[in-house]
Amino acid sequence: MSIAKCLDFCSNLTVRGSLIVFIQVLAIGLIRENLISAMENSVIEEAVIHEIKSRVESHRDELVQFMKDLCAIPSYDSKIRDVGERAAVEMKKLGFDEVWFDQMGNIVGRIGNGPTKLLYDSHIDTVGIGDPNEWEWDPFEGKVENGILFARGASDEKASTPGMIYGLAIARDLGLLEGVTGYYFGNMEEWCDGIAPNALVDAEGIRPDFVVIGEPTKMQIYRGHKGRVEMKIVAKGKSAHAASNHLGVNAIYKLIPAIHAISTMGRPELADHPFLGQGRITITDMKVETPSINAVPNLATIYIDRRITFGEDPEAVVQQIDHIIAEYEDVDVKVLFYDDPSYTGFVFPVDKIFPAWALPENHPYVEAGLEAGSLLWDDSLTTGAWSFSTNGTYWMGKAHIPSIGFGPGDEIHAHTVIDQVVLDDVVRATEWYALMPGMLPAKQE
Ligand SMILES: [Zn+2]
């Protein structure tokens, strides 16, 4: 609102009321002007930091309640409709320009119209609760003890949603979204990481320039993780009565060379990387088809989880296995694929290939994330990598969109019955999410 409009607006009020309102509106106008000029000079002044902190503090109770509400609404098995609606309520309350469910059923909020697109990614589905008897409290209602909320999804990763949504609204109010379109993307990730962002880009036509992944980073900046390829080796045999086994071909025995080769695989087949560590390979399951336990099995399948480090080509690791089994007849390797319909019935088939990714420590976007932390909290943040996989496997691994991770919580609590987050970090993270739109480097064309 310009000052001329303020005067216009104030002239219609009573003298006493109008003076107070005029001073308030003028003050907000001046703060905003200062912030914009600070942005234009690419210098975030102390006044901006102060204003972000005081606005976040004024929303503390709402942020904490929002977080508790998100956890109290079950959202396992990718069923995120209800929790998405809760997030939508908050976005509408804060005046997001557009809030909608995409075709897959993820909740999207848009705020601002600038040419640079910044997307905050928070998966709002969780894993199940496992054996309910293992929980000492209601996994959804949770409990708060010493400022820590214990509930399913507290660390992984509902905790980033409140800060992302409030942060974007605060950024808009302080002029930090000038030139930026901010998106909040509350999505499903647990069953197939990367599929929701892949569908957002390909089916909805929204391709951000920068992404922040809200998976737990202990309030530090993460810049990569290993990838993986999920495969199976299928061996076909020929069934026969066990008493006449010489008439059959045992499908299990045909897998023995592959099992041996995989179990003894090491360097150099499994490459190493100084930041992400070494690739790994594990046979994780086996299924056998046999007429009976008194018969030679006709089919045997082993499942392989191949963790790939940065620099390992997903296709090359499939060829590695292909090479091992090349000389055996009727033994084949296949990459698994995911085509389960979402709760809206949306199907988006993808191969279960999840590339590793890593941004260098001195990448301008990583540096911007670190700088936002030091401006807010003085002490410098560090960079790290997740042990687990995230939607970054698509954002950076496949689409090559600069991505960093920032979120409350610690991944060691993910999927456990002591799933937890420090509520003060849920609030404090909002400051970083509010500042980050004002810290973006020039986008890569
Ligand atoms: Zn997660």
Image (cartoon, grey):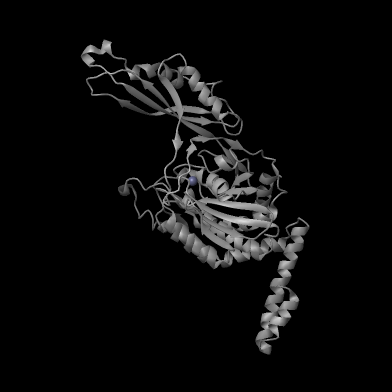
Please identify the quadrant where the C terminus is shown.
top right
- Left or right, 364 with respect to 226, comes to right
Residue 62 lies, in percent from the top left, at 51, 65
Q: How many marks on residues?
A: 0
Query: Which residue sits at x=35%, y=16%?
Result: 253
Q: Nearer the viewer, residue 304 or 326?
A: 326
Residue 265 lies, in percent from the top left, at 49, 20
Q: Residue furthest right?
A: 41
Please identify the quadrant where the N terminus is shown.
bottom right
As displayed, is residue 56 above or below residue 280?
A: below
Residue 210 in view in this figure: yes
Query: Which residue sits at x=63%, y=40%?
Result: 400
As displayed, is residue 26 above or below residue 228?
A: below
Q: Nearer the viewer, residue 194 or 339?
A: 339
- Left or right, 181 with respect to 86, comes to right
Residue 423 lies, in percent from the top left, at 50, 57
Residue 52 in view in this figure: no
As displayed, is residue 154 above or below residue 316?
A: below
Q: Residue furthest top?
A: 246
- Left or right, 340 with respect to 299, comes to right
As displayed, is residue 438 above or below residue 241?
A: below
Query: Which residue sits at x=52%, y=21%?
Result: 320
Residue 151 lies, in percent from the top left, at 41, 53
